[in-house]
Each structure stands twice: as C-alpha cells, then as structure tokens.
Amino acid sequence: SQNPDYDLSRSTPTHLGGMRSSLASYGDPHFSLFLRKVFIKSLGYTEEALSKPIIGITNTFSTFNPCHAHVPQLIEAAKRGILAAGGLPMEFPTISIHESFSSPTSMYLRNLMAMDTEEMIRAQPVDATILIGGCDKTVPAQLMGGISANKPFMPLITGPMMPGSVSGVRVGACTDCRSNWAKYRAGEIDLEDIMAVNEELAPTGGTCGVMGTASTMACVVAALGLTDLRSGATAAAVSSARLRVAENAGKAAVDMLASHRQRVRPVELLTRESFLNAITILQAIGGSTNAVVHLLAIINRHPDPNVRTITLQTIDDIGRRTPLLIDLKPSGEGYMTDFHNAGGMLALLHTLRPAGLLHENVMTYTGQTLSEVLDATPFKSFAYSRQIIRPLDNPLHPASSLVVLRGNLAPDGCVIKASASKDRRLLNHKGPACVFRNSKDLAERIDDPNLNVTKDSVLVLQGIGPIGNPGMPEAGLIPIPRKLGAQGVEDMLRISDGRMSGTAGGTVVLHISPESADPESIFGVVKDGDMISVDMEKRRLNLDVSEDEINKRREERTKELKDEKIKEGKGANGRENAWAERRTMRGYRGLYERSVNQAHLGCDFDFLTSDGPATQ
Ligand code: FES
Ligand code: MG
C-alpha cells in the first residue's frame, strides 16, 4: 500500500502526531518528512513506530546532580508507560542544574535552562514532553520553558531524599545542615561530630528532604494540576512509588493526546485560577521564599494578561486567608517522607477543601477538573496524617506564612517567611542598621570582635541582588555575629536584596526591590546606625531617615559613580543611568546582566516574558 506521507497529490502530510509534527521547512514538506525519516531510521525505527504519538523525555541526569541521581530509572519507567499506552518515547538531554555545583549560583543558570528546554521542545518533533526535574531551579525552568513553547508537557518530579540519622536523631538536607553548622560555629559540637553529620545529611539521592525550594515547587506542580496528587510531589526518590509515578506520567502523556482534549496545551490548561491554587498551596505548606520569585517568573511567561494580573500583592492577599498546615522543617519539624506517609498533596487538598480556599473548576492533566479528581479520590484522614497535615482548626501558623512588605526601603516589595522566624518579637522591631556593602565585606567583618552590633541591631546586606551579585546568591541568611552567637543570640532581623535557601529559617527579609545596585535604590544608601523599622501587621519596612537626607545620599552616590569614571549610558530597558555601563557584555553573563529583571518580576530575562523588555 502507498505511504500517504509521500503522496505528492496532497499539499502537505497533514496528520498530526509522530514525525509529522512541527515539520522543519525546506519549502517542500514531503521532502522534509522524507529526510527526517531517513535519519531517524538510521537508529532502527520502523514506519509503524514512527507513526505513533512521539513523547519526548528530557534527560536531566548529571553526575554533578545527586538530586537527579535516579533520572535513568525514571526514564526507563516513563518509557514503559509510554509504550504500553501506544506512544513512542524519545529521550533527549537538556542541562542539569544542582544547587551546589552551579557557580556563581543556580539562579544565574535557571533562565538558561528555561531557554534550553523551550527551544528543544520547539525544535524537535515531539507531540508532548515529559520534563524530569527536581533540584530547586530545574522545575521552575521547565515550567517557564514549557509554557513558552506551549506544547503539551508533563512534569515528572525526581522526588525527595530519605532523612538520615545521627546518634538516633533524624537529620536531612538542608535545614539540619545549617543548624548543625551553627552549633559547630558556636563550639557546641566538635569536629568529629560535624564530620559524622556530614555523612548523614543526604543519605540517598533525591531532592532536599525538607520543605525547601525543591519540595515547594513539587507541591506547586501538583497544585497546578500537572501531576498525580497522591504521590507525584512527595513519593521518595528511591521508592517504588516514584517509579510508578514515572510509568503513569508516560501513560498520561499519551492519553492526553489521544483523547483530543481541548485544554491540553499549557497555555489553555493553566488559568489564573490554577495559579491562585498554587499560591494557596505555597502558603499552606510554608513554602520557600524562592518559589515566590519562580512563580512570578512562570506567571509572567503566560500570554494571558488576566493570568499576569497576579503580583507579589496577590501572594500576600492569599496568605492572609490561608493557614499553614504542614508541619515540616524549616517552619515545623517533619520531613518530606512524613508528608508523603501522611497522605501527601491529596490529603492537603482534601483538608483545605471545606474552607473554600481552592478554585475547583480548574482543569488538571487528567482531563478532569480538580473538583472531579477530588470527588473520585477521597482521602480518609488518620491520626498520623493530622499530625503532619494539621486540621484547619489547629494550624501550625494561623495565616501569612509568606509575607510581602513594602516601604521606602522596598518600593517594589520584598518577602519574608514569617512562619520560619525563630524570635517572633523581631517581626515588629525597630533597631539600628549594621551595614555590609557586599558578601566580601560581610565575610571580612561579621565575626570581628569590635563590630558595633547588639542583638537589637538590624543586619543589612547590600549588593546581592540579581545584578549586583549576578545570580542573586542565597546569602540572605546573614550569620549571627560570633560574639552574639556565643551569648546565645539565635535570631536577629536581617535584610538583603538577595535570596535565602528555602531550607533556612530566621527573621530574614529578602528580595528587596529595586536592589541596591540600582543607583535610584534607597536600600543602597542605608548607613550604619540608621534606624530601620518593620511592622508585620501593616506590612511596612521603613528606613527612618528624612527624605532630604536620603536624596542627599543618592546624589552623592550618583556623583561617586561618575567619579569612578563610569560614563553615562543608555541602559537596558531604556533606563538612563551609569549602572548599565558597569555591566560585562560578553557571553551568557552579558546576556544575563543586560536582560535580567528584578525579583518582584521573577528575575527572568525581560525578552522572555510575555510583556517583553518594557516590563522593567
Ligand atoms: Fe537539589 Fe536541595 S540541592 S534540592
Ligand atoms: Mg535550596
């Protein structure tokens, strides 16, 4: 029988699916398809296999990425699911980003991964793609790229690691990394102890086992309706449940194409309400501050302006009515495996349901609405599940786990994880600033016995914003000066334009926008001894210095910049200032410095957002 693909009486090979999707054009579509098949057949594929829906699988394995250690097994399981459902799996690499092996920071590389993911989905003849990610920046990058490419995709989370054990005490990366290191710094434990802890903090592959950024983004994926509610976000990386999640993801990717569903493309599947649900979950789990930046980046990729009405303010508004229910570190005590054993995201959504906090009419990857999914999969709560997933009338924190503050120090906003504060009095506090110009200055002086600082001081770290220290490092958890630590001070009010690991705790204000490197920033002119006040109820963060004095300092600063012989220039985004001239121009770093937007917009490249470069 004649192969219709090469029937020249048809103007194009019209069937959707398989090798025929998104044909590169040589001007002759039949010839394009002919060539494409020539090359893929060199790998031994038959016409029959090539006629199936093609499901791409991103291979994000790297020996430098232990959070993705089990990606090969996940690929194998996903392939099984795809083949069993009648699809053809095709695996391809995209970059792999691990928190500890991504100098200067993983955030610096997130947008590169988003571009890689978007363009490879776009370039290759995939009908849908399974995006395997787990470590902090990988899932956000994949959601950003996947939405921009707008071909159907299924996130497949690598899953959390198991907790370890030291002298009978459970430990896990990386909340306990910090607490144990702080004990070692304060002389409470010795070298031998800290070395034993080092062996056990990450006892298996998989993502950090607390409610850090990786776990938060996994829960966000479930809240967006993009993975299995019972296990997709929480099943351990090393569990058989995780492999079943992978097999089911393969099947689901084929099914979602086969059923010719209307809302299968991410842009139609993900609505404003889907993102509102994600933010509700972010607040209910006591999620990572990093996830705020990521969610805004993902949202600002969406072409629907109605979706893009969601801002930092929306996150705060939702927080005011959402209790923190999940008792995991760093806000509480447990580990991700506990959350999974307690019922995972399915149990959490059922717990939130009666409060009317969810938009249940949103579509999920299954083709059912969230309301239909929850009706079809009831969850019977038990004593242990109520311990880890608190009931509405006994929350871990009544509301506003993540709070957005504004004021003259942060006109475009900043974020604090109020639920992770160790000394709650600091949430309403006024104290004199102890200022560090940048990370180097901090490292040199923080433990100086003559540092002019008391427990009531406000530790200020400038120069670690998206451009000031490219990649916006997770240096916002300023260490307690050693001399105060030795007196038993465990928490202080700390403020920066940088980020903090989602696994960390303390009274730490982050993501000050605009960042201090911006010559117009007031945060950039804070000096030692200035009074800073924070008022959680009023959502205010203020520098109590007169406007005249602030303006005088900004003028001086601009003059200083000129004296450094930095020429006036027209910066990126049309902003006239000397700042732009300081930027390195070569390579990816040049691209990053010219194009990254501020934290309140998601630290995306302006030319990748739906609004384009004008947003900043
Ligand atoms: Fe990968 Fe923490 S280092 S999730
Ligand atoms: Mg992290």
Image (cartoon, grey):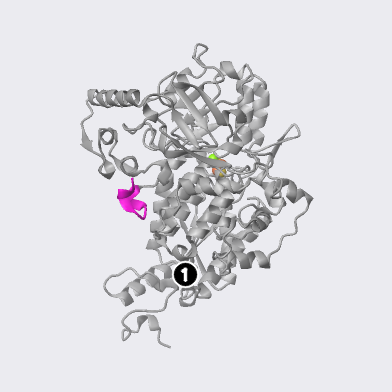
Which residues are the magenta region? 606-616
Secondary structure under badge 1?
Answer: loop
**From where the camera sits, is residue 131 visible?**
no
Q: Is residue 613 above or below residue 560?
A: below
Q: Viewer-proximal residue, 84 or 348?
A: 348
Q: Viewer-proximal residue, 345 or 322?
A: 322
* Residue at 67% over, 58% down: 354
Q: Is residue 407 magenta?
A: no
Q: Identify which amino acid the numbered label 1 is placed on.
A: Gly
Residue 332 drawn at (x, y percent):
67, 39
Q: Quadrant of ligand 2?
A: top right
**How packed is label 1: few (under 14 Cα within 10 Å), some, or many (20 or more)?**
few
Q: Is residue 582 above or below residue 572?
A: above
Q: Is residue 191 above or below residue 535?
A: above
Q: Can you name the residue that lies furthest to the top here?
A: 450
**From where the camera sits, is residue 284 visible?**
yes
Count of numbered badges drawn on the protein: 1
* Residue at 54% over, 27% down: 429
Q: Is residue 449 above or below residue 205?
A: above
Q: Can you name the residue that lies furthest to the bottom here?
A: 1
* Residue at 67% over, 24% down: 192
Residue at mark 1: 44
Residue 224 drawn at (x, y percent):
54, 58
Report whether 289 appears left or right of 602. right
Q: Main secondary structure of the magenta part?
A: helix
Residue 174 drawn at (x, y percent):
60, 37
* Residue at 58% over, 31% down: 506
| Residue 356 figure quarter | bottom right
Q: Can you name the residue that lies furthest to the right here?
A: 383
Residue 355 drawn at (x, y percent):
65, 55
Q: Which quadrant of the figure contains the C terminus?
A: top left
